[in-house]
Amino acid sequence: MWNKDEVQGKTDQLKGKIKESVGNATNDEQLRDEGKYRRGREQLLVCARDVCPAPIKRDCLEWLSQLEAIAPTIVLGAKEGTKDLSDVKVSVDGVPVTDKLDGKPIQMDLGKHTFKFEFAGQTKEEDFIIGAGQKNRNVSVTFPVATSCTSTYASYPPVTRRAPSGLNAMAVPIPPTANSADDVPAR
C-alpha cells in the first residue's frame, strides 16, 4: 500500500506530464501558424506519447497528421557537369543537414533559406523560398567539372627548342607557355 506522500508524488508527476502535454499542444498551434513546421512536429511528437492523457494524445496525433500533409519537403541534389553527386555536405541557414545526398525528402519550415553545398573543396550557396504544401521540391546545384593540370598539358604537342646552327644538341621538352621564335612543334 502506498502512503500519502507517495500518492501525492505520483499525482504531482502526472500533473506535470499533463501540463507539459497541454503546453506542447498549445505551443504547436503557434509554431504551425508561424510556418515553423519542424519545431511544431517535434512538439507534437512529445504530446502524442503514451504517457499523455488520451484526449490530448488523440488531438496531437490528429494535428501531427494535418501538419505532415501541409509541411513542405525538399530533396537535395548536386551535379558535377551532368554527373549526379552523393558525397556532398549541405547546411541550411548555417545548420548542418547532411554529409551525403541520399534522395530522401527533408521537412522544411516556410520562407527563405540559404543552402550551402560543399564538394571537393568547392562551395555553392543558393537562396530558395520554400512555400506551404510543396512536396519533394528539388533543391540542387551544379558544380563545374574539375580539370587537372596534367590533362590540360597533355592536349598540347611537346615543344622543343632548336639548337643553334652547326651544333648537334638533344631536344629538350619545354612547357607550352614558352614564347620564343625558336619554338617549333616536335615531329
Image (cartoon, rainbow, N blue to C red):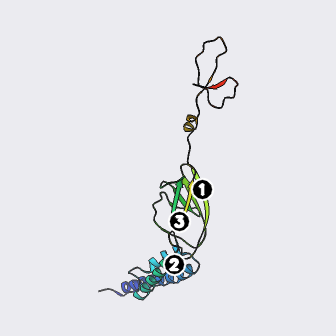
Residue type pointed to by label 1: Lys
Marks 3 and 1 sit apart, C-alpha to C-alpha, by 16 Å
Q: Which residue is mark 2?
A: 70
Front residue of this view, candidates 109 and 1: 109
Could you tell me which secondary element the residue under label 1 belongs to? strand
Q: Which residue is mark 3?
A: 138
Front residue of this view, candidates 33 and 136: 136
Ranked by sequence position, the earlier of labels 3 and 2 is 2
Front residue of this view, candidates 166 and 140: 166
**Circles 1, 2 touching at the beta carbon (< 8 Å):** no
Q: Could you classify mark 2 by the number of other residues whose Cα lies within 10 Å: few (under 14), some (14-19), or many (20 or more)?
A: some
Marks 3 and 2 sit apart, C-alpha to C-alpha, by 17 Å
Could you tell me which secondary element the residue under label 3 belongs to? strand
Could you tell me which secondary element the residue under label 2 belongs to? helix
Residue type pointed to by label 3: Asn
Percent from the top left, x then y, of residue 100?
Answer: 47, 57
Q: Could you classify mark 1 by the number of other residues whose Cα lies within 10 Å: few (under 14), some (14-19), or many (20 or more)?
A: few
Mark 3 vs mark 2, foreground winner is: 3
From the viewer's perspective, tell me whether residue 68 is left or right of residue 93. left
Q: Residue at x 59, y 20 (%)?
A: 171
From the viewer's perspective, tell me whether residue 177 is left or right of residue 41. right
Residue type pointed to by label 2: Ile
Vertical order, 6 against 176 (above or below): below
Q: How many numbered marks, from 0 up?
A: 3
Q: Quadrant of residue 32?
A: bottom right
Q: Quadrant of residue 126?
A: bottom right
**Residue 124, numbered circle:** 1
**Circles 3, 1 touching at the beta carbon (< 8 Å):** no
Ranked by sequence position, the earlier of labels 1 and 2 is 2
Vertical order, 147 against 55 (above or below): above
Marks 1 and 2 sit apart, C-alpha to C-alpha, by 29 Å
Q: Residue at x 32, y 86 (%)?
A: 2
